[in-house]
């Protein structure tokens, strides 16, 4: 009786649970905001800047990760390494000028992830395994190319990637631009809609005549470009780089994507949600810092909250 | 005393009563067939026997004592064993390991020799005497896997064996092996409940047959007291209702021609031609290849071969895009898996195939898409207010409307392929879907649908093509097809002595 699970899914409880999750989400954000605003020093320029910086670097990667998750490929473990490697490329080619270096880094990030996207799209390779392979290749390749040394830039003109405009850190402006472009692609372009369809039901997308492999490849291209932007921003900020620069960013990014409420199974979510996810996590961290929790406790509490939010979504999904 | 009996069983899912006041009893050493059309309630009844479902009313008696079979494990302890259609063997493990897998009576410290001997004995009884215990299950054919599964139940001291369409995917030789095993079980004093669509099998190995229709027990007859025609009449019941739209068959110009279609491993040498404005129904049971024929035409089979023309222009199989460019569109039988984007909203589902027409420089014309979605929703009768609801909150009937509403209004009416268009759709929505299918015909489409429900086939078809185990048996024009003949075609007797006799 194939009809049974279908009917079960139609029970009104499913809809009720969805509203409940939405309500819990709003209450949670309101509580966090109230908690943050009553924390002494949270509204100071210093901590707002720290918050913006924290969300900018990870945020760019998280926007890219959103596309990977949305198309049904869970996550990439290679984006952090892509961030570092693009930063290295940027620093190493600064001698040609800032803009060419930026474009080279962007191109590099795109090539790295596009190769993975093609493997996953056309050969239906397991996305996690492919990203692990990509990670090893990048780390190995970088060690080979740099001899394990830090890279110091050979040019000037990094100002376009750091400093501030009207008091706002430039990094944050780049991040917000990434969010806007990402959300535009997702909801206003054909390829954006197609990516969501592929993530929702890849077999149905195939049966409708969509090239599912191309859609997946495009999602990876976007992810690579986002990671490269993050890499360039980090490189500009620190003025030097190694493969540690973006280490762990993939995990932070996927946490932001999931806390934002993009479905891990793909097919539902948005870049705006990821923006919310990144902000929520960063706010928790800043608040904990300002309230004087030790670093270990900060990690622990952040982890627990992320886990709680993800459980909440899982319940909403399953009724 | 009957070994297993149910008295006045009722089971409902939401508002739908799936079983209504069903009573039957099974004696020791009896092979009982349960027959009925799809949706008659056979599987639900079996799930009550095996403790998967609990009845909403009535009693279940085991050995004459009223018993509440609480869960499948409990059913096993009572000696009631299900031989599942989807086999529950672990392919990588050996036959021996599979036989003992999950058996709670195996002590932590046991004598392997003892287990081997008992497995051997069970395999001998089901006719697998020559099979080595170390053979991995992956190396066995489906038929032999079923026999291993039966042997596994034997080692668990099962007394009632329930088989749900065990022969649907088997070859003649393998079917004969299963029958031999069932006869051996019967000689051992076991009872068997045998669910099948194939009437030949009922007469080949069963002692009695119980017929279900729309959740009610029509009756139980000894196999000597009934013939095939009477059994069919019991299964099908009254004449066709007002479910189906009235129409005048007026075929237009030829639309599609299929020659020598092969879809390994099932379909061989399939030929068909269909005209605009007509519905062609391919009638066949599970395993007949009817569904595979349509999937191949839609470009969804990786190894289909054959020549297909639409409007006189050939197109190559094995690519969805080429099929669509030729004007061939497909509605899947697997709605959740392949038909509908459950996490997208209804409107997005309706315009799924219309994105390119509304795209300029890669950017979607969202207001145009919204207007199209509203138009399509009106055309298939989905409430406009629901366009923004996620598809998984809609009923099965509404989801099916989304799946084929997306093909309305292409450049030129083409071929609409539909597999089991009303599977999992309730009665009210069915009539609406049939009406929509006819509307496609009026627009100049040619509709080809595969269905295992005869009533639907005869109610809708201008041309009926019957299939049995991958072969085309016969084709009938509307009016020339009667239920008995088509049913005989698609439930073909198993004995190889009567090939194609019914055609």
Image (cartoon, grey):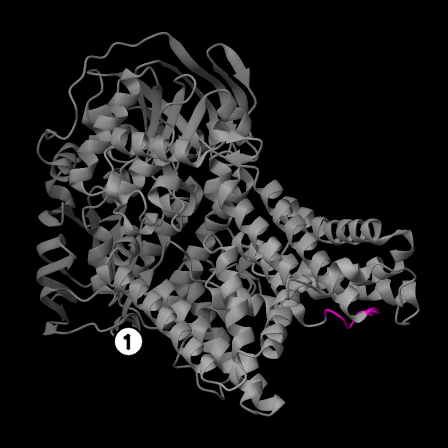
Relative to A186, is B439 on the left or the right? left
Q: Residues within 10 Å of mark 1 (few under 14, many from 20)?
A: few
User: Residue B371, relative to residue A133: is it above or below?
Assistant: above
Question: Which residue appears at 31% of the width and 73% of the height?
Answer: B73
User: Residue A113, relative to residue A315: is it above or below?
Assistant: above
Question: In the rendered image, which quarter contains the C terminus of chain A?
Answer: bottom left
Question: Which residue appears at 40% of the width and 21% of the height?
Answer: B415
Frontmost residue, B201 versus A32: A32
User: Residue B262, relative to residue A172: is it above or below?
Assistant: above
- The chain identifier of the residue carrying mark 1 reads B
Relative to B199, is B144 on the left or the right? right
Give x and y (percent) for residue B438: 25, 22
Q: Which residue is mark 1?
A: B77
Quarter of the figure with residue B480:
top left
Question: Which residue appears at 26% of the width and 50% of the height?
Answer: B195
Relative to A123, is B472 on the left or the right? left
- Extreme top residue here? B253
Question: Which residue appears at 35% of the width and 40% of the height?
Answer: B347
The region drawn magenta spans A239-246
Quarter of the figure with residue B240:
top left
Q: Is residue B82 magenta?
A: no
Give x and y (percent) for residue B29: 21, 61
């Amino acid at each position: 009786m194939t009809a049974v699970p279908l009917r079960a899914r139609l029970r009104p409880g499913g809809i009720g649970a969805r509203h409940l999750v939405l309500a819990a989400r709003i209450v949670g954000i309101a509580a966090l905001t109230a908690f943050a605003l009553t924390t002494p020093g949270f509204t100071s320029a210093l901590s707002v800047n720290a918050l913006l910086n924290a969300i900018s670097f990870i945020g760019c990667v998280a926007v890219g990760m959103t596309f990977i998750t949305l198309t049904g490929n869970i996550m990439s473990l290679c984006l952090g390494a892509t961030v570092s490697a693009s930063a290295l490329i940027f620093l190493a080619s600064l001698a040609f000028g800032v803009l060419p270096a930026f474009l080279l880094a962007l191109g590099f990030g795109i090539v790295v992830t596009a190769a993975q996207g093609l493997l996953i799209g056309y050969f239906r390779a397991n996305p996690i395994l492919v990203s692990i392979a990509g990670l090893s290749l990048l780390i190995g390749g970088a060690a080979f190319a740099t001899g394990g040394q830090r890279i110091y830039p050979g040019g000037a003109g990094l100002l376009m990637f750091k400093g501030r405009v009207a008091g706002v850190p430039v990094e944050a402006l780049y991040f917000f631009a990434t969010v806007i472009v990402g959300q535009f692609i997702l909801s206003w372009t054909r390829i954006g809609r197609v990516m969501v369809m592929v993530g929702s039901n890849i077999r149905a997308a195939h049966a409708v005549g969509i090239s599912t492999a191309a859609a997946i490849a495009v999602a990876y291209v976007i992810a690579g470009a986002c990671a490269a932007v993050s890499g360039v921003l980090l490189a500009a900020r620190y003025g030097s780089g190694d493969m540690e620069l973006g280490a762990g960013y993939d995990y932070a990014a996927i946490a932001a994507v999931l806390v934002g409420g993009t479905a891990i199974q793909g097919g539902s979510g948005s870049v705006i949600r990821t923006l919310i996810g990144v902000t929520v996590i960063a706010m928790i961290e800043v608040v904990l810092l300002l309230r004087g929790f030790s670093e270990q406790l900060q990690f622990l509490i952040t982890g627990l909250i992320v886990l709680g939010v993800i459980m909440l979504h899982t319940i909403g999904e399953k009724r | 005393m009957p070994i297993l009996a149910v008295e006045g069983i009722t089971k409902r899912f939401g508002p739908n009563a799936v079983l209504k006041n069903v009573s039957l009893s099974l004696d020791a050493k009896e092979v009982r067939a349960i027959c009925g059309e799809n949706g008659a309630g056979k599987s639900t009844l079996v799930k009550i026997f095996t403790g998967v479902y609990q009845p909403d009313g009535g009693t279940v008696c085991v050995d004459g004592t009223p018993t509440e079979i609480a869960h499948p494990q409990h059913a096993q302890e009572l000696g009631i064993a299900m031989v599942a259609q989807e086999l529950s063997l672990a392919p990588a493990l050996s036959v021996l390991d599979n036989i003992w897998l999950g058996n709670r009576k195996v002590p932590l410290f046991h004598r392997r020799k003892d287990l081997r001997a008992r497995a051997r004995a069970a395999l001998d009884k089901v006719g697998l005497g020559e099979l080595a215990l170390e053979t991995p299950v992956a190396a066995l054919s489906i038929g032999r896997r079923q026999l291993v599964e039966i042997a596994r139940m034997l080692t668990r001291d099962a007394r009632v064996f329930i088989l749900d369409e065990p022969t649907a995917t088997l070859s003649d030789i393998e079917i004969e092996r299963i029958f031999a095993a069932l006869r051996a079980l019967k000689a051992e004093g076991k009872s068997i409940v045998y669910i099948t669509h194939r009437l030949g099998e009922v007469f080949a190995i069963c002692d009695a047959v119980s017929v279900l229709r729309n959740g009610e027990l029509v009756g139980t007859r000894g196999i000597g007291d009934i013939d095939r025609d009477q059994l069919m009449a019991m299964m099908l019941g009254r004449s066709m209702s007002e479910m189906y739209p009235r129409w005048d068959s007026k075929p237009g110009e030829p639309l599609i021609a299929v020659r020598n279609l092969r879809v390994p491993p099932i379909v061989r040498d399939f030929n068909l031609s269909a005209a605009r404005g007509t519905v062609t129904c391919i009638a066949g049971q599970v395993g007949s290849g009817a569904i595979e024929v349509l999937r191949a035409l839609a470009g969804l089979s990786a190894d289909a071969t054959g020549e297909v023309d639409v409007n006189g222009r050939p197109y190559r199989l094995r690519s969805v895009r080429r099929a669509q460019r030729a004007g061939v569109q497909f509605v899947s039988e697997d709605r959740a898996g392949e038909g509908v984007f459950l996490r997208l909203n209804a409107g997005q589902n309706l315009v799924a195939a219309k994105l390119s027409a509304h795209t300029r420089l890669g950017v979607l014309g969202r207001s145009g898409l919204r207007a199209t979605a509203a138009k399509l929703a009106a055309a298939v009768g989905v409430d406009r207010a629901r366009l923004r609801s996620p598809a998984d909150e809609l009923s099965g009937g509404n989801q099916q409307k989304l799946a084929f509403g997306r093909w309305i209004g292409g450049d030129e009416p083409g071929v609409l392929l539909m597999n089991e268009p009303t599977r999992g759709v309730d009665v009210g929505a069915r009539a609406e879907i049939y009406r929509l299918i006819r509307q496609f015909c009026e627009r100049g489409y040619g509709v080809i649908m595969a269905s295992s429900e005869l009533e639907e086939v005869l109610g809708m078809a201008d041309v009926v093509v019957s299939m049995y185990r991958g072969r085309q048996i016969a084709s009938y024009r509307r009016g020339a097809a009667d239920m008995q003949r088509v049913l005989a075609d698609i439930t073909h007797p198993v004995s190889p002595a009567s090939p194609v006799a019914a055609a």
